[in-house]
Amino acid sequence: MAAVVGYTTGVYDMFHIGHLNLLRNASESCDELIVGVTSDDLSIAAKGKRPIVPYDERAEIVASVRYVDRVVEQRSMDKMAAWQRLHFDVMFVGDDWRGTTAWERIERDFGELGVRIAYFPYTPHTSSTALRRTVFGA
Amino acid sequence: MKGCRHIGYTSDAYDLFGVGHLDQLRAARADCDFLIVGVHCDDLVLRTTGEPPVIPFDERLAIARAMRSVDAAIGQLSDDLLDVWDQLRFDRLFVLPRSAVAPTYAGLRQMGVDIVVLDPRRVSAGGEPDPIRAAVPASVPTPARRG
């Protein structure tokens, strides 16, 4: 049987234990893990804020994690366009997205291609937003 | 560890892990055959820097351990590297320029340990400021500690 290729995306700003746990869980559920690291421009467009750590450094840190086989730059939220380039078999998503309109649609579209969406519990205690608040007191 | 010619050791707080830390680990790993990383425990960080780390010890340890360049990671409780050496018997110690003249190095040299000073190019404490550190205001409020 062919190797299962997994895909997951994120900003991975101020790399922390929540990111690491997601990457480890994802790597345990596939043979090759590709990670899409969100570009600075897409982060600004989607979240309205520039990441504290610039793209090159965020990508370098994610690529240095032993669970990650390959890093690509995520320049668009269009997961289908990403699939056309990467042909992953399963996509890993934090379970805070489960049941949202956008992801229900993504699940349907990918279901037709035989691509599975796997939801993982996102470690609630540390998120970049919480870390920003701790570090900046804002 | 069989067949390892040089066992390297390097240590730091690895708080708010950034590319400076990554460079430090990669440079050290490139210059030995098995790299052990000592992550300073919270008390040691407080003692040596006067401030507690932003990220708690177990999380800093897990992140250092997950890096490809790291063969083993342990908690470092003491700032006496001879104590550490006594347990690990490394023969190459990688240090940052800021700590290149610590008194315990003489003792380590007597034990046959090479002291290697890392190139500070992107090392967090060296010339170029780390983006995370640069973004943090000089007086960081003590973060709320978890349990």
Image (cartoon, rainbow, N blue to C red):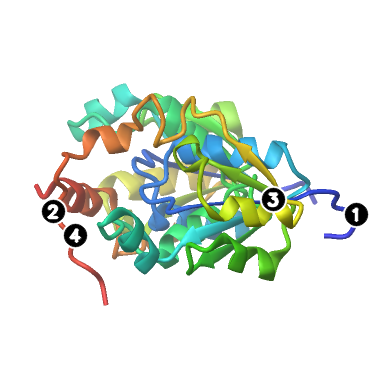
B10 above or below A29?
A: above
Discs 3 and 1 share one subunit: yes
Tell me the CA gap for discs 3 and 2. 40 Å
Location of mark 3 (residue) = B109
B14 above or below A88?
A: below
- For disc 1, the neighbor class at 10 Å (few under 14, some 14 to 19, many from 20) is few
- Report x, y in % for residue A86: 59, 31
Marker disc for residue B130: none
Q: Residue at x 67, y 70 (%)?
A: B87
Q: Residue at x 46, y 28 (%)?
A: B122
State which mark lies toward you, 4 or 3: 3
Tell me the CA gap for discs 3 and 1. 23 Å
Discs 4 and 3 share one subunit: yes
Secondary structure state at the residue bearing disc 4: loop
- Report x, y in % for residue A38: 39, 32
Identify residue type, mark 2: Pro
**Viewer-closest of A88 and B136:** B136
**In the rendered structure, are the residues bearing label 3 and label 1 in contact, judged by CB atoms less than 8 Å apart?**
no
Secondary structure state at the residue bearing disc 1: loop
Judging from the image, mark 3 belongs to the subunit labelled B
The C terminus of chain B, quarter of image: bottom left
Secondary structure state at the residue bearing disc 2: loop
Location of mark 2 (residue) = B141
**In the rendered structure, are the residues bearing label 2 and label 1 in contact, judged by CB atoms less than 8 Å apart?**
no
Identify residue type, mark 3: Arg
Location of mark 4 (residue) = B143
Tell me the CA gap for discs 2 and 1. 48 Å
Identify residue type, mark 1: Gly
